[in-house]
Image: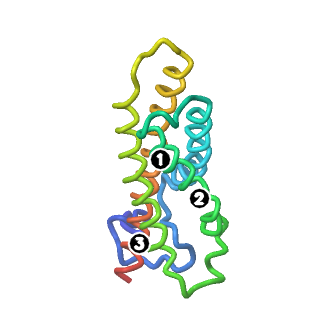
């Protein structure tokens, strides 16, 4: 039955063995899960090499980048599958809320950062800001993919 291989078409399929859905693109979930903190660190490093403290938009993206980078490190408990040892915590709901909030805040930060990037005589700042703005959008899209997968996983567990 083809619907047994695609859990998004059959949401009542049991996923108790593994909280992640068995997608053909399950690898992209883990790739985005790993890319989010790595590229978030890149955004963080590109901004700290400039005079970001003079502009409020750059302070906001620094807050978002550092905050979610640290939270992602704490969220490694979810990535290492040790969440099965603590069944009292609704991990799919936690993952959905984490990824959804990261998507929203990173998208707001990336848009405000892209609007605040201006060409100035110091090209180092401009190049770093433009590059970090691009990678902030990439990180936001990674969190968007994670949010989609988390939603499917959450939805399939709530319909059991």
Where residue 50 sits: x, y (%)? 57, 29
Within 10 Å of the Cα at label 1, are there few (<14), some (14-19), or many (20+) other Cα atoms? Answer: many
According to the picture, the residue beneath numbered tag 3 turns out to be 154
According to the picture, the residue beneath numbered tag 2 turns out to be 72
Within 10 Å of the Cα at label 3, are there few (<14), some (14-19), or many (20+) other Cα atoms? Answer: many
Distance, label 3 to label 1, CA atoms, is 18 Å
Q: Secondary structure at mark 3?
A: helix
Which disc number belongs to residue 142?
1
Q: Secondary structure at mark 2?
A: helix
Q: Nearer the viewer, residue 103 or 58?
A: 58
Sequence order check: which comes first, mark 1 or mark 2?
2
The colouring scheme, among rainbow, by chain, secondary structure or one colour, is rainbow
The answer to whether residue 96 is above or below residue 131 is below
Distance, label 2 to label 3, CA atoms, is 19 Å
Residue 1 visible here: no
Where residue 74 sits: x, y (%)? 63, 64
Q: Secondary structure at mark 1?
A: helix
The answer to whether residue 154 is above or below residue 113 is below
Residue 13 visible here: yes
Where residue 44 sits: x, y (%)? 58, 40
Image quadrant containing the N terminus:
bottom left
Sequence order check: which comes first, mark 2 or mark 3?
2
Quick check: 24 left or right of 49? left
- Residue under the point 43% across and 66% down: 96
* Mark 3 touches mark 1? (CB < 8 Å): no
Q: Nearer the viewer, residue 81 or 10?
A: 81
Sequence order check: which comes first, mark 3 or mark 1?
1
């Amino acid at each position: 039955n083809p619907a047994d291989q695609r859990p998004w078409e059959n949401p009542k399929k049991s996923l108790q063995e593994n909280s992640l859905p068995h997608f053909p693109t399950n690898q992209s979930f883990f790739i985005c899960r790993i890319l989010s903190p790595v590229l978030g660190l890149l955004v963080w490093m590109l901004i700290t090499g400039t005079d970001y403290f003079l502009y409020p938009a750059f302070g906001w993206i620094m807050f978002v980048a550092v905050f979610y980078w640290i939270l992602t490190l704490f969220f490694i408990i979810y990535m290492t599958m040790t969440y099965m040892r603590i069944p009292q915590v609704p991990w799919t709901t936690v993952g959905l809320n984490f990824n959804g909030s990261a998507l929203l805040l990173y998208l707001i930060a990336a848009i405000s950062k892209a609007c605040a990037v201006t060409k100035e005589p110091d090209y180092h700042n401009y190049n770093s800001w433009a590059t970090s703005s691009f990678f902030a959008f990439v990180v936001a899209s990674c969190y968007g993919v994670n949010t989609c997968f988390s939603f499917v996983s959450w939805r399939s567990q709530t319909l059991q």
